[in-house]
């Protein structure tokens, strides 16, 4: 966490640079200070505007009472980003503090910044920008997309170890076509499953299946402890779902593996039982294809009916 001492160290470094610049160009230190103040002022306005456009529903949080702003509060951004409230407040106020790329990445994810916005954030914060250096920018190429598309009518999805949804085929969207799930705007299946009402959850046996998913998440978490994206996910889900928080505290660990899962769908006449299988992907570390096949003939008929409904 950034401290007041860090802020003072930043100012000391700037003073030394100003002294050196003044010897070469008497007007340069003043110009640098003016430019830095302008960038910090722009950074404050930019962060405020981006925060205002992200609603609590976008990140799976309840709206709460007496909310005077349409977007997130500063403390909510700090919590979801895994940083201190004071530090984020100083950042949004444009104070001259140090910001690491990892922390800026976490703030950018919370505020749902796209590529150009993320680069703009780095420039305003005076931090070197390295496009594509983070795992969250992984894109599934046409070859992998073609494979999962070819599995239709069997549902298939590409997850990373945080259960972020990187790619799907149409049949997967059929199976998970739950308005409360798809309207959250968060492309992470755990967010959807833990933040919808139990009657809206597509997974029938939540008390059997969700603990296994959390244990699988924790099995991967050990390799990423302290990384902003992981800490933000765990802290955000713990705040949004007491059930997730309870499961996370249990400390259970499990690897991904084949299972028979039961799904419900508002357009299906009966429950759908599917066998899930995880397949690793060469060239995409810590990513996997999860394919679902009907566990019995009745379930196969329900999947086929969902496909006909989509095509018709």
Image (cartoon, grey):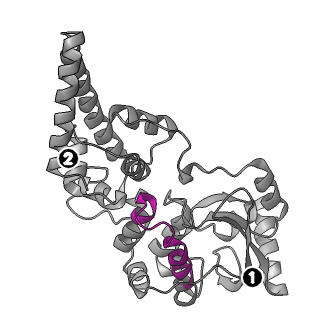
**Does 26 sit left or right of 136 as displayed?**
left
Residue 164, above or below 72? below
* Residue at left offset 51%, top offset 67%: 180
CA distance for labels 2 and 1: 53 Å
Residue 54: x, y in percent? Answer: 38, 50
Q: Nearer the viewer, residue 146 or 254?
A: 254
Query: Does any portion of residue 32 appear in the rendered image?
Result: yes
**Does 142 sit left or right of 40 as displayed?**
right
Badge 2 density bin: few <14, some 14–19, many ≥20, Cα 10 Å? some
On whether residue 120 falls in the magenta region, the answer is: no
Residue 75: x, y in percent? Answer: 24, 57
Badge 1 density bin: few <14, some 14–19, many ≥20, Cα 10 Å? some
Q: Quadrant of residue 80?
A: bottom left
- Circles 2 and 1: CB atoms closer than 8 Å: no
Residue 106: x, y in percent? Answer: 40, 53
* Residue at left offset 43%, top offset 61%: 227
Secondary element at image label 1: strand
Residue tagged by mark 1? 275
Mark 2 or mark 1: whose residue is earlier in sequence: 2
Residue tagged by mark 2? 6
Please give the range of residues in magenta. Answer: 212-231
Q: Quadrant of residue 303?
A: bottom right
Secondary element at image label 2: helix
**Does 113 sit left or right of 259 as displayed?**
left
Q: Main secondary structure of the magenta part?
A: helix
Residue 45: x, y in percent? Answer: 27, 34
Residue 93, above or below 26? below
Q: Nearer the viewer, residue 205 or 97?
A: 97
Q: Which mark is residue 206?
A: none
* Residue at left offset 60%, top offset 80%: 203
């Amino acid at each position: 966490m950034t401290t007041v001492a860090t802020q003072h160290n930043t100012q000391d470094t700037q003073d030394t640079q100003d002294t050196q610049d003044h010897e070469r160009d008497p007007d340069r230190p003043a110009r640098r200070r003016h430019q830095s103040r302008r960038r910090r002022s722009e950074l404050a306005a930019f962060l405020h505007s981006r925060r205002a456009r992200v609603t609590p529903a976008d990140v799976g949080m309840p709206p709460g009472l007496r909310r005077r702003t349409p977007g997130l509060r500063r403390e909510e951004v700090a919590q979801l980003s895994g940083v201190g409230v004071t530090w984020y407040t100083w950042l949004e106020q444009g104070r001259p503090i140090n910001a690491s790329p990892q922390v800026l990445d976490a703030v950018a994810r919370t505020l749902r910044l796209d590529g150009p916005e993320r680069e703009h954030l780095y420039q305003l914060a005076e931090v070197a920008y390295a496009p594509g250096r983070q795992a969250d920018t992984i894109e599934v190429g046409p070859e992998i997309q073609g494979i999962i598309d070819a599995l239709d009518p069997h549902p298939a999805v590409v997850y990373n170890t945080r259960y972020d949804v990187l790619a799907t085929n149409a049949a997967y969207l059929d199976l998970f076509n739950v308005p409360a799930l798809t309207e959250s705007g968060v492309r992470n299946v755990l967010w959807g499953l833990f933040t919808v009402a139990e009657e809206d959850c597509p997974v029938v046996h939540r008390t059997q299946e969700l603990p296994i998913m959390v244990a699988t998440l924790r099995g991967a978490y050990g390799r990423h402890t302290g990384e902003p994206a992981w800490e933000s996910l765990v802290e955000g889900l713990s705040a949004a779902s007491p059930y997730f928080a309870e499961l996370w505290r249990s400390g259970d660990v499990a690897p991904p593996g084949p299972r028979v899962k039961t799904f419900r769908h508002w357009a299906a006449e009966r429950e759908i039982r599917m066998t899930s299988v995880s397949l690793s992907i060469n060239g995409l570390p810590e990513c996997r294809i999860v394919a679902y096949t009907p566990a019995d003939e009745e379930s196969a008929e329900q999947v086929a009916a969902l496909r006909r409904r989509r095509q018709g």
